[in-house]
Image (cartoon, rainbow, N blue to C red):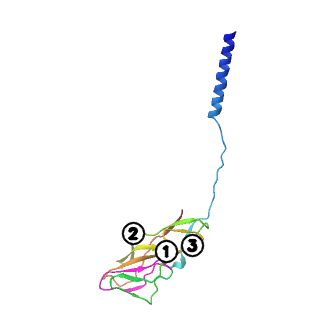
Amino acid sequence: MKKVLITVIAIAAFILSATAADNVANKTVSVQGKARIITPITLANTGSQALDFGVIARGTTDATIVVGANASPSPSVATGDAVIISSAPQTAAKFTVGGETGKTYAITIPSTTQTIISGANTLNINVFTCSNGATGTIGTNDIFYVGGTLSVPAVAVAASYTGTFNVTVNYN
């Protein structure tokens, strides 16, 4: 009888320990799911204000013309003997950012040479600059300007040159 009782106790202990182990291995916990939707970021070329190097009289040597990234740039001839005609306005491209107030964003401007054309003739813009650097905060830095450097070869064909380049903003 003693053996039977010990056997029953041993079996009961085994069953209880197996049940306890199963309970530990199969716990369920509820967790909360969350999301916050914010206003999409927007970017507009304010007033369609382009990066405009103005009217330039080419010289006898290759030249570079710089338009700074600010509201009232003072274009300059960085190299060469070209002449900027001051009666024609020069402007930095102007952009306005919209979206969720207080959110920061990254600004991406071209890092490679961009080409503007007139028929088969081309000029190059490079060394792009941004008035806000590489970032801004919506509600603080909603407007920024992009400037650049135009290469004007001594053999540039007299014409009106146009083209486009991309500027991108993304939430951080």
Which residue is denoted by mark 1 in the rendering? 131
Query: Which amino acid, mark 3?
Result: Asp
Q: Earlier along the polypeptide chain: callout 1 or callout 3?
A: 1
**Any part of residue 117 in sight:** no
**Could you say whether the residue bearing mark 2 is in a helix, strand or loop?**
loop
Measured along the vertical axis of the image, is residue 35 above or below residue 98?
A: above
Q: Position of residue 78 (x, y in %)?
A: 37, 81
Q: Which residue position holds label 2?
A: 112
Q: Which residue was labeled with disc 3?
A: 142
* Residue at 39% in and 69% down: 112
Numbered range of the magenta stretch: 50-70
Determine whether, in the image, residue 65 is placed left or right of residue 26: left
Q: Earlier in the sequence, mark 2 or mark 3?
A: 2
Q: Which quarter of the rendered picture does the N terminus lie within?
A: top right
Of pointers 2 and 1, the one earlier in the residue sequence: 2
Q: Mark 1 packing: few (<14 Cα in 10 Å), some, or many (20+)? A: some
Q: Comparing marks 2 and 3, which lies closer to the viewer?
A: 3
Magenta stretch, main secondary structure class: loop
Residue 121 x/y as whole percent: 35, 78
